[in-house]
Image: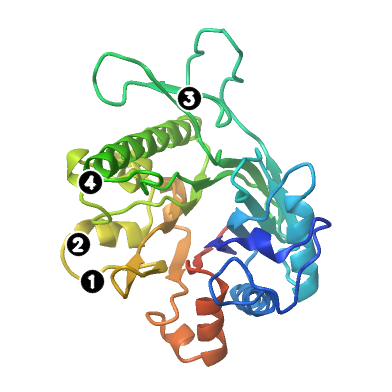
């Protein structure tokens, strides 16, 4: 079975309010790329992935006028994808949802959030709150409780394998970016950057708490998505000791595993894998970073066969297949990550 995680930059801009694809010469939300070009590129990439399930980060918007599931299933139908059904969780206000596209002949997937349901005015219940609620934590060790919420609540799924009937938990995540939007001046940028990193680490702690609940219950877990963090991404990392990636992975016998994350964390200096490529206009260069992960619980590690980042320059097959290489560069500023794992037996 092949699982994929793919952050599609502004996927929402490729659909009308009825969920239909806008395949025309109008500009997409990607600079200098038309809607037709991005749509065609995404069709090539998704077809090449041929995944049984794809965690779509920055999926099309869900609101009173738009429907994430309808849009994704319309996209799948247009390109004849096996992963032709879609499911999403709690909608957010960013026009960038988290959703799973899957092959209904291989798996069943449903939104199955866990944790205490938030109740106004009630004292906090034990355990990690539901992801559309509020997490209470002292972020800066000042004996004052901070309240943290997800701008993009993680997608919690109960997944059943049709072949064997095996059940597992899959969590799709897109942790909040640390960029200091709106701040001007060095001191203001520093303050906001540190505050944003604190919030992101709190989200990672919250997510890890949910993972531990599943592990304690003996449930296999896969965490997929864009954690927007990793070693060496900003100068504030040393203030906190650990990245969001390290927190979500955990330590010891209960640690989740992703070989790219392990490789990056073990190489503070030198080459490391990357899953995203951004142009820095003020510096006139591209920045590459490892942001996208597929982490598996210890009981699944021996069944995992191959992790792969579909990087247009670093992956030999992508590099030597011009159509796919160019499609990856046109489709998004992130590249898909896949895991081939023995889950069908």
Given residues 55 and 179, the one toward you in this image is 179
- Residue 202, x across and y down, in percent: 37, 32
Labels 4 and 2: the sequence-earlier one: 4
- Residue 211, x across and y down, in percent: 46, 36
Name the residue: 36% across, 16% down: 145
Check disc 2: other Cα within 10 Å, few if <14, some if 14-19, many if 20+: few
Check disc 1: other Cα within 10 Å, few if <14, some if 14-19, many if 20+: few
Labels 3 and 4: the sequence-earlier one: 3
Element under disc 3: loop
Mark 2 highlights which residue? Answer: 267
Q: Quadrant of residue 201?
A: top left
Labels 3 and 2: the sequence-earlier one: 3
Name the residue: 31% across, 53% down: 230
Distance from label 1 to label 2 (Cα)?
A: 7 Å
Name the residue: 75% across, 75% down: 23
Q: Nearer the viewer, mark 3 or mark 4?
A: 4
Q: Are marks 1 and 2 in contact (CB under 8 Å)?
A: yes
Given residues 125 and 38, the one toward you in this image is 38
Mark 4 highlights which residue? Answer: 186
């Amino acid at each position: 079975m092949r699982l994929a995680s793919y952050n599609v930059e502004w996927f929402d801009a490729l659909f009308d309010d009825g969920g239909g694809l806008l395949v025309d010469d109008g500009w997409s939300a990607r600079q200098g790329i038309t809607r037709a070009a991005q749509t065609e590129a995404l069709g090539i990439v998704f077809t090449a992935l041929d995944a049984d399930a794809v965690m779509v980060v920055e999926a099309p918007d869900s609101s009173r006028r738009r429907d994430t599931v309808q849009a994704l299933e319309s996209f799948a139908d247009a390109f004849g994808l096996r992963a032709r059904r879609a499911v999403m969780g709690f909608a957010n206000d960013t026009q960038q949802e988290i959703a799973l596209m899957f092959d209904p002949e291989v798996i069943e997937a449903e939104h199955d959030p866990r944790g205490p349901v938030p109740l106004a005015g009630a004292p906090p219940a034990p355990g990690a709150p539901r992801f559309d609620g509020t997490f209470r934590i002292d972020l800066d060790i000042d004996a004052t409780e901070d309240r943290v919420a997800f701008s993009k609540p993680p997608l919690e799924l109960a997944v059943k394998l049709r072949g064997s009937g095996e059940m597992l938990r899959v969590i799709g995540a897109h942790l909040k970016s640390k960029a200091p939007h709106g701040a001007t001046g060095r001191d203001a940028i520093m303050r906001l950057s540190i505050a944003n990193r604190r919030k992101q680490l709190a989200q990672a702690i919250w997510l890890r708490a949910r993972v531990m609940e599943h592990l304690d219950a003996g449930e296999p877990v896969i965490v997929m998505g864009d954690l927007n963090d990793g070693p060496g991404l900003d100068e504030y990392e040393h203030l906190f000791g650990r990245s969001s990636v390290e927190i979500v992975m955990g330590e010891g016998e209960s640690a989740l595993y992703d070989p790219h994350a392990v490789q990056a964390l073990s190489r503070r200096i030198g080459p490391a894998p990357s899953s995203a490529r951004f142009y820095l206009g003020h510096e006139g260069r591209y920045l590459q970073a490892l942001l996208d992960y597929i982490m598996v619980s210890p009981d699944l590690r021996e069944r995992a066969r191959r992790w792969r980042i579909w990087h247009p320059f670093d992956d030999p097959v992508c590099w030597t297949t011009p159509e796919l290489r160019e499609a990856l560069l046109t489709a998004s500023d992130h590249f898909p990550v896949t895991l081939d794992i023995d889950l069908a037996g």
